[in-house]
């Protein structure tokens, strides 16, 4: 397993356009997380999945944001009608889930997708 | 709601010296885990060390060790024999019953040769 992969690494888009990011987690991990990180700040939680079920969404995740994890494998994060305030690094991470040693496990992070909205 | 506070936005250390990064947290839970993550410039975040709240013994990983004070809700990271490769952002993180990591704002560590 090569770890958590995110694609693309960088995305520049015009305001108002839609963008979609992809995350491929470690195959054995049931949990998948999306975080947003702005410059000089710590990662902020957006949402997470246990297998294919989206179990929690942060208030940061406005209705312009949607995430999916079909079949409990890869995940996509879509941002519609992008705004300049959406410019950030979007991090994906995976971890073992319930019954796999969830609580004691750290996350494995991907390299992130850096979004710039111009 | 749980919160994590890192009060040192930036720290600097001389190569081969020791530095301590501070972290405090707030929670009403009794069982939880604490983590330190390292994020080098333009590189992915990696786990440095973790501590189980029910363990009194402080965790150590080679040159990295923690000082966990449960009553004070304090979780500091000590880096001994600092190396140039230790330069990075360091994030303290809390994981409780929900299983989600809550991060502090980070401390930028510079290592001077």
Image (spheres, coloured by chain):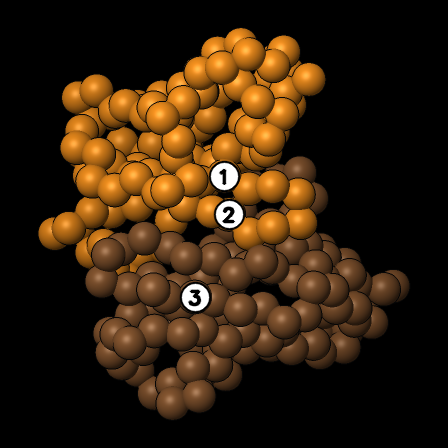
- Give above or below for A103 relative to A61: below
Q: Name the residue under label 3.
A: B3
> Circles 2 and 1: CB distance less than 8 Å?
yes
**Residue A103 or residue A14, whichever sits in front:** A14
Secondary structure beneath disc 3?
A: strand
Q: How far apart are marks 2 and 1 (CA)?
A: 5 Å
Residue A83 spot, x, y in % from top left: 57, 22
The answer, for residue B80, to whether it is visible in the render is no
Residue depicted at 53% across the width and 19% down the height:
A82
Find residue A92 and report its image quarter: top left
Q: Which chain is the one coloured orange?
A: A
Establish whether labels 1 and 3 are both on one chain.
no
Establish whether labels 2 and 3 are both on one chain.
no
> Circles 2 and 3: CB distance less than 8 Å?
no
Q: Which numbered circle lies on residue A19?
A: none
Q: Which of marks 2 and 1 is nearer the N terminus?
A: 1
Secondary structure beneath disc 1?
A: strand
Residue depicted at 25% across the width and 24% down the height:
A69
Q: Mark 2 points at which residue?
A: A43
- Give above or below for A87 relative to A18: below
Q: Name the residue under label 1.
A: A36
Category of crowding for the residue at label 3, using alpha-carbon neighbours closer than 10 angstroms: few (below 14), some (14–19), many (at least 20): few
Residue A107 spot, x, y in % from top left: 38, 49
Chain B rendering hue: brown
Q: Mark 2 lies on which chain?
A: A
Residue A12 spot, x, y in % from top left: 64, 16
- Give above or below for B3 relative to B73: above
* Quadrant in the picture for the C terminus of chain A: top right
């Amino acid at each position: 397993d090569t770890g958590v992969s995110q694609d693309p690494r960088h995305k520049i888009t015009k305001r108002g356009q839609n963008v979609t990011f992809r995350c491929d987690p470690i195959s054995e991990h049931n949990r998948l997380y999306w975080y947003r990180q702005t410059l000089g700040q710590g990662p902020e939680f957006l949402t997470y999945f246990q297998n294919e079920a989206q179990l929690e969404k942060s208030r940061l995740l406005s209705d312009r944001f949607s995430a999916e994890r079909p079949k409990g494998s890869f995940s996509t994060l879509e941002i519609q009608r992008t705004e300049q305030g959406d410019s950030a690094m979007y991090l994906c991470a995976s971890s073992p889930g319930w019954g796999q040693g969830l609580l004691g496990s750290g996350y494995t992070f991907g390299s992130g997708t850096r979004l710039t909205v111009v | 709601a749980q919160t994590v506070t890192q009060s040192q936005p930036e720290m600097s250390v001389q190569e081969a010296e020791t530095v301590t990064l501070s972290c405090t947290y707030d929670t009403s839970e009794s069982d939880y885990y604490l983590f330190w993550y390292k994020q080098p410039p333009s590189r992915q975040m990696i786990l440095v060390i973790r501590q189980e709240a029910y363990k009194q013994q402080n965790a150590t990983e080679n040159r990295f060790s923690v000082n966990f004070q449960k009553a004070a809700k304090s979780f500091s990271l000590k880096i001994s024999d600092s190396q140039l490769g230790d330069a990075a952002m360091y994030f303290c993180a809390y994981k409780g019953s929900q299983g989600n990591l809550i991060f502090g704002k980070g401390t930028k560590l510079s290592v001077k040769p």
